Image (cartoon, helix red, strand yellow):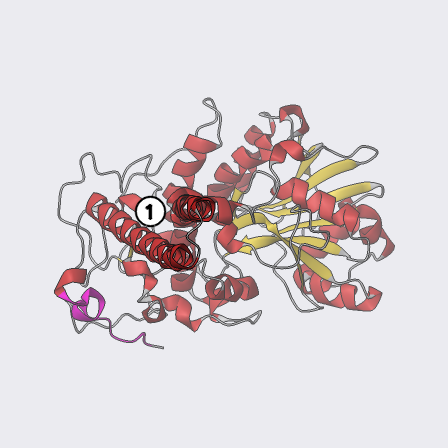
Amino acid sequence: MSFESISRSSVEGDQNDRLLESPSEVADVEKGYQRRRHADSIESTYSTVRLWAERQWQNTPSLKVAYLTYTLIVVATLFALLLLSPFGNELQRNASKPSGVAKWSKPEGFKIIGLVFFGRRATVEILDCYLKKNLVSNGGYLDEVQFVAVKATEEDVAWLDQLLLSADEYQKIVMKEMSFEKVWNNTVERNHMYIKIDDDLVYLSDDAIPQLVHSKMKHPEALDIAANLINAAKLGWMHYHIGAIHSYLPETEPPFSKIVNDQSYGPSAWRASALPTWNATGKENATLDIDGPPPYKGHRWLPLRQNDTNLSKTPISRSAYDALSPNWESWAIGAQTHYSFLQNLERNQLDTFHFGTDVDGDGREAIWNMAYERMNINLLAIWGDDVRDNAPFGKSDDEEFLSVDLPRRLNRPLLVNTYALAVHFSFFTQKGIYDTDLLNRYRAYANGMVCTANNQIRIEQRP
């Protein structure tokens, strides 16, 4: 399926809304628009209050009333300044965020075991930093992390053996025959809670695992609790419709300008604000086939900006709430989702991904009931007893079994805690994502924000 033609002129708009080449210029313009909106709103609020006060002055000549009236003008104006300023907006936005990690306390009386289905070294290098951060020895929740090499090469298994030496809590599960159902049937024990972790997760929010653990304890009516997965089949449609996805398109040709000291490249490059604005590079009539191959290996996706007014002209517009939706099969939708996430991450706006019901109104979870529909289980909490009571699974598709078949049989649905954020790098149908520079961007973020100084991840050189 061909994506509709996107011309430079259709994205540029008029002369006053031209494409901006400099990230700093873009930022300045966006700040200017924001200030202008705030100023206009404040002026409107002030004018309304002033006109009301003047009428009160004419009708009530009393000095006390007049004094009170003009006091109200000052108070209303100051309130408008606070409410409509960036600071005021930040207060309103942050009000919907979950409680901080410091407020969580690890429950006692049972072990919390991470079960990692291992097979891809390139992403586990990143995941390793998040796992170590969540170990009990580092103040986290994971008593153990068990790696099961389901589909790994001999080289990857040798690398895993070296990784196991880096943490006492790391273990390797060895089985003669490796398959998803055999892992569940033969490795899970009673009296423990298991956090199923796929090996291609490249970001976990600070309280993702605590969120899953406490929601699982809080909701015995649910068989399992899943994370709010970025780059997911059904949840991708939700993220699009709640405003968490932004306008991005691929850079069709490598830039010819020098990249020395360019913050959009290099070992520390992950911030979306450093990216130049996308343009059609003179190919006004070019057609982008979003089901076709990536333009070149190591390419970037660039923001269209302009307050996402061109979002409908980007791949995410094909999103659907379905287990086999374009969100599952399209590498282009996946890439756009990843760059949108990094933009929200930089701006401290990850709450844009939150939705669902705060059951108790305490700001500690937001629940979305999958209602026995299929859900990606890349990060999921389940009691070992529930696994043992229903083993053997007898089905190789553990995702279908744990999100649809078994929940329906037990009348215990899978719930999603949307405050527990995890970024899933790619489905097997999205191989084109590996031809972007996204792996390096997640490596760069982890190196700077998550990994310790002696646990830095290698950064591949841009081809």
Q: Secondary structure at mark 1?
A: helix
* Residue 257 seen anywhere in this rendered image of the structure: yes
- Side of 161 relative to 262 (left or right): right
Is 248 included in the stretch rendered in magenta? no
Residue found at the very far right of the displayed protein: 389
Residue 151: horizontal and vertical position, in percent? 58, 50
Front in this rendered view, residue 399 or 137: 137
Which image quarter is the C terminus in?
A: top left
Residue 437: horizontal and vertical position, in percent? 34, 48
Which residue is the site of mark 1?
Answer: 272
Is 12 included in the stretch rendered in magenta? yes
Q: Can you say whether 392 is above or below 262 in the image?
A: below
- Side of 443 relative to 373 (left or right): left
Q: Can you say whether 293 is above or below 116 in the image?
A: below
Front in this rendered view, residue 155 or 322: 322
Which image quarter is the N terminus in?
A: bottom left
Main SS class of the magenta portion in the image: loop
Q: Which segment did they paint magenta?
A: 2-14
- Rate crowding at label 1 as few (under 14), some (14 to 19) or many (20 or more) other CA atoms within 10 Å: many
* Residue 248 seen anywhere in this rendered image of the structure: no
Front in this rendered view, residue 52 or 214: 52
Front in this rendered view, residue 71 or 36: 71
Residue displayed at 64% across by 30% down: 135
Question: Please, what is the three-letter code of the amino acid marked with disc 1?
Answer: Ala
Residue 226: horizontal and vertical position, in percent? 66, 54
